[in-house]
Amino acid sequence: MNKIEAIDVNFYYGDFHALKGISMEIPQNKVVAFIGPSGCGKSTFLRLFNRMNDLIPGSRLQGRILIDGQDIYAPGGMEVDELRKNVGMVFQRPNPFPKSIFDNVAYGLRVNGIKDKEFIRQRVEESLRGAALWDEVKDKLNSSAYALSGGQQQRLCIARAMAISPSVLLMDEPASALDPISTAKVEELICELRNQVTIVIVTHNMQQASRVSDKTAFFYMGEMIEYDDTKVIFTNPHKEATQNYITGRFG
Amino acid sequence: MRRIFEKAVKWLLTASGFVTSIVILLIIGFLFTEGAGLFKEKVIEEGYVLALNRENNVKELTAAQIKAIFDEDVTNWKEFGGPDMRIEPFRLEDADKLFTEEELGGQYENAGSLIASLIEAHPGMVAFVPESMIPKGANLNFIEDRSISPKEVFAGSEWFPTATPAPLFGMWPLLAGTLWVSLFAILFALPFGISIAVYMSEVASERVRGFLKPVIELLNGIPSVVYGFFGLIVIVPLLQQVFGLPVGESGLAGSIVLAIMALPTIVTVAEDAMRSCPRSLREASLALGATQWQTVYRVVIPSSMSGIASGVVLGIGRAVGETMAVLMVTGNAAAVPSSILEPLRTIPATIAAELGEAPAGGAHYQSLFLLGVILFFITFFINLCVEYISSRNKAKNS
Amino acid sequence: MAIETFPKGYGARKRRSQKTAFGIFRGLSLFIVLVLFAILGFIIYRGAGVIDWTFLTEAPSDGMTSGGIFPAIIGTLLLMAGSAIVAFPVGIMSGIYMNEYASKSGWAVKFIRLMTNNLSGVPSIVFGLFGMALFVKYLGFGDSILAGSLTLGLLSLPLVIRTTEEALKDIPAGIREGSLALGASKLQTIWKVVLPMGMPRIITGLILSLGRVSGETAPILFTCAAYFFPQLPSSIFDQCMALPYHLYVISTSGTDIEAQQPIAYGTALVLIIIVLVINLLAGVLRKYFENRLKLK
């Protein structure tokens, strides 16, 4: 069953044609990686799934994107905050709020109307455990999130996103600002989360894509060149451009 | 040659760098020397004495008590620890009513002895006369004169700098007036200032913002006399009608005008602070399903709190120090206000209104400089607060 | 495993509260725009009929119940020029020192910045007191254009310093290094490279500081301003009339309110026009210089 479906998506920043006629299907509870050189449109495409590009003035979308069969851009359809409640996101750089660790994780629950303190506490603990961070922070839940290391901050951001139980998690190069050990931890986490959510991850790092993903899409110059099982992409790609990219001949 | 020139220029530039510091020191120095002179002045007007009958054992009177006597608010010496007698105040002018011109003499040469005998005949009399007039060896008591004390100045609740025989320099009503007006001004300006700052930084499109920004700058650029004039012509009569006041000039009128004047400072500083809140934080919040408004009040405002606070404090500073507009619309009554609808008077307005008439070097003149010192230190303190808030913020961000 | 306990209808509620909140903000912003237009409109409406050639070029007459405001205009222009002579050189040099010479983390910069910020917060009436004590009395200049210009100059100093500093701060370090690498001395670099690049923004700031000076009343109350001085000043030791003080005088302590009110509107309008022109000029210059930089 397809979780996300993009149908002939074109996207423009002003006059710039950033995404050209992309159609793809992302199955439920799989990890899909987007790879490609900088500026190829993979992040832009990812940010369409939770309508994050709405914030950019002068941008324009053609085509349709369906999540659970529902057009998320249909006028008068789904509200954008409802969509984002269901489609979580982890960003390139860890971006915890200047609040306590606890309040960071509780944020999503609170802004969506949950007031039950006991429930929030429970949910914060579960999410931090789920992000393999609980043991490190359980004694300092009330200290500032800025006191954590970069790797811990990023896992906190994952816990924060997971706290409201989204069914899709978008990850925009989540490990690019981290050291190798923290990166390994984040990758481990992705592998554990795949049972709960559908994960779409943008990455520069091809080893990472091959390690964590079930399917991989290769983007180049705003087009999706190839989309297939990760094994196929990395061992036997059909397109020459994909071949060139994964063997490091450009990009 | 060139090296020497470069060196000389460097010294010149360094020297100019310190000009502002020197100006601050000079301001403190000059205001202090003039202002502190007030405490060397005597309570009773220079060259005059308060003469009493021998039987009256009252030795000391405060300036407020002297005023009460001559205003005939207090009529018995008992109140001041003296004998149970009616107080009969006497001023030099009264001599003309009691004695004929021949009796006094063309040059008033006989006035002294006449007054002395008058006091001797009236046990309850207190006379305010020039010291030189009293004949040597007259059998009279005198009120002991002493220097004006800081307590009567800073805690005194009456400001009558031109009262005779003893002027009153109680600064409390002026301080209270300043604080009342500024407080209300900030209460009015705050909701507007924060709303406009949020609107400009979070809601408005670039085009609307490009329109609002010059509006705020212009609001900041309008001279304070023009605000005062507008307040006098429009706001004062309006308030008079709406609240049915005997006079429209009131603390409220001052607060409204000041609120408009403090607004640009608050908006500019608060908007800058909110715009510098990183985009990544806003995105993090929105991605969790928060609305834009939730993002603003849960993330943007808390994280730019110190900037907003700086703006508000600077706005207060502007309100406290504003002179002309307040002078024109507050009615300038030097009494501790019991309501914002009454006329009141602020420190800057007092200085502006009275310095022109105060004889240079006199107690009144010095008291106005002392008010300047107080004002200087209030704003100095406010600025230090702003520095502290923003330095703490810098430390937090790094 | 979606959370089933998200309260129903909360989404609609929070969207509604956003609508309300933003609506309020929009309303309050609109209100302030209306306030500005009301002030400007009122004064323009009542003052426009008063201003004519006679009003601008003649001295007040008949106990200031008729005639024009020529001496006040000239006085204000003289004070603007005088304060510029006082504040611009020192302020620009101070700004250069802060940005180019003083070490960024040293005590001197911190101290000077603290003092400059404090000076900019000192109320204008305190400048008036200070100017009276130092220039009028201590140095014996008397009530004069000289004393008024010095006082106003010191008042605008912090603004000039900050403008200069900010203009120079935005010039990339690489440009200075490029010049120094070619063998230019530090002073040559500042004079030939840094200052010309910073000039546009410095000039814009200076113009705005003149705007502030033109409207100040409190500092000149006791240092310079004359209640009535119909002839033009002949030296810098003369008193002069000034627009803001003139407006204050005729709107509060006039001898004939009826006859003087039109003069007050006219004076207020002239003051507003000066401020508008200065703001407009600064805006136009900023745009012009920005475009020129872009072309480069």
Image: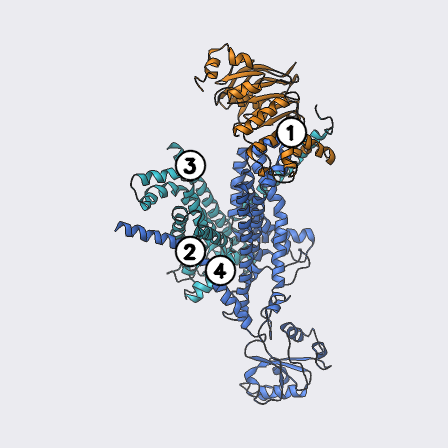
Chain colours: A orange, B blue, C cyan
Q: Nearer the viewer, residue B337 or A100?
A: A100
Q: Is residue C117 left or right of residue B148?
A: left
The image position of residue C236, as x and y in percent, is: 38, 60
Sooner in the amino-acid sequence: mark 1 or mark 2: 2
> Mark 3 and mark 4 in contact (Cβ < 8 Å)?
no
Q: Amino acid at mark 1?
A: Gly
Vertical order, B300 against A163 (above or below): below
Q: Amino acid at mark 2?
A: Val
Residues indicated by labels 2 and 4 sit on the same polypeptide chain: no
Label 4: how many residues lie within 10 Å, few (<14), some (14-19) or many (20+)? many
The image position of residue B249, as x and y in percent, is: 62, 56
Sooner in the amino-acid sequence: mark 4 or mark 3: 4
Q: Label 2 lies in what chain?
A: B
Distance from Cα at disc 3 to Cα at disc 1: 39 Å
Q: Amino acid at mark 4?
A: Gly
The residue mark sitting in front, 1 or 2, is 1
The residue mark sitting in front, 2 or 4, is 2
- Residue visible at 68% across and 32% down? A125
Secondary structure state at the residue bearing disc 3:
helix
Q: Nearer the viewer, residue C92 or B395?
A: B395
Residues indicated by labels 2 and 3 sit on the same polypeptide chain: no
The residue mark sitting in front, 2 or 3, is 2
Residue behind mark 2: B19
Distance from Cα at disc 2 to Cα at disc 3: 32 Å
> Mark 2 and mark 1 in contact (Cβ < 8 Å)?
no
Distance from Cα at disc 2 to Cα at disc 4: 18 Å
Residue behind mark 1: B289
Q: Label 3 lies in what chain?
A: C
Residues indicated by labels 3 and 1 sit on the same polypeptide chain: no
Residue behind mark 4: C128
Residue behind mark 3: C290
